[in-house]
Image (cartoon, rainbow, N blue to C red):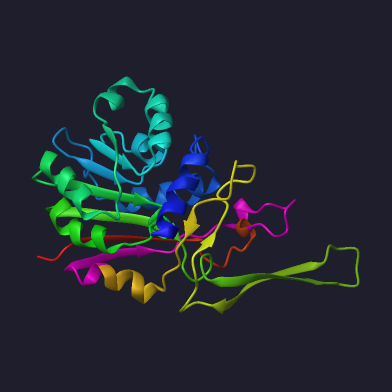
Amino acid sequence: MEFHQASQSSWEANAAIGQKGNKYWKVLQRPALARLIPRGGTSSSSSKALELATGNGLGARWLAAAEGAASRSAEMLKHARRRQSDEAAAAKTAYRQVDVTNAAAFDELLAGEPEGFDVVLLNMAIMDIADLKPLAKALPKLLKPDGAFVATMLHPVFFTSGFTRSIELKDRNSLDKPEITRAKVIREYLDVPPSHAVAQWGQPTLQKVTFHRPIHELFTTFFREGLVMDAIEEPAFTEADRVEERIESHANFTQLPALLAFRLRRSQ
């Protein structure tokens, strides 16, 4: 409970960040979501999408036909509503504050949408949630029979584990620049305690608490509730995304995926 409250408090303090989305959104998240969200899943007038942990509404605004978006931060919802400038999309989008660690919150959502949703989206938030079990239990009810749960997150192996970045410079005995070799050394993976992180340099306070879960622990939580996976991706930056002025930038580690993206459905 202590970590859960700390996470909520940090999102309140940092609510104003991330209006248009950074490189992670533009290069990795948005393209992955476009591939994983079923074609037509939010295109028809009768389709309904639910984005959980929408934050300040970036993902909800992208889902042009979204019918609902939920955030755990009241302050972020203020920014989400203010930034919904498209009147047509705004008329189809409703925001509310929801605690995804509280099973009763999902009962309230289902009371308003008893038939469920075509798409439930959780973009870059799984590692921010202290307890995934209430969400996993609710998904079979939140999803329509052919609906899909789509999620992206920081990669558990290369981002939320206990790792260090290794950068080696090899002199070539010539006028050429040194050859640079980059690697991430994973020192802790199976048991990594919650830790604070930064989403954007210059933000008012340290970011929410990040909760690391090994891949088997992450997916078992959902599989136990009868959900099945039918798509998974590991988006990585490319040479075109390199940040030459910052040798340590994660965007320069082009052989190591930055995100994990996947799609789950109800078992038939």
- Residue furthest to the front in view is 2
**Which residue is more in the foreground, 213 or 103?**
103
- Residue 177 image-quadrant placement: bottom right
- Residue 146 image-quadrant placement: bottom left
Picture residue at 78% right of the left edge, 68% below the top: 179
Residue 173 at x, y percent in the picture:
91, 72
Q: Is residue 1 magenta?
A: no
Q: Is residue 101 left or right of residue 207?
A: left
Q: Is residue 248 magenta?
A: yes
Residue 58 at x, y percent in the picture:
41, 38
**Can I make out residue 14 in this image?**
no
Picture residue at 38% right of the left edge, 41% below the top: 59
Looking at the image, is 211 positioned above or below residue 102? below
Residue 111 at x, y percent in the picture:
11, 42
**Which residue is more in the foreground, 105 or 264?**
105
**Can I make out residue 254 in this image?**
yes
Picture residue at 23% right of the left edge, 42% below the top: 49
**Which residue is more in the foreground, 156 or 236?**
156
Assign the N terminus to one quadrant of the image. Answer: bottom left
Residue 264 at x, y percent in the picture:
25, 61
Q: Is residue 154 left or right of residue 178?
A: left
- Residue furthest to the top in view is 87
Specify start and end residues of the magenta stretch as a single range. Answer: 222-249
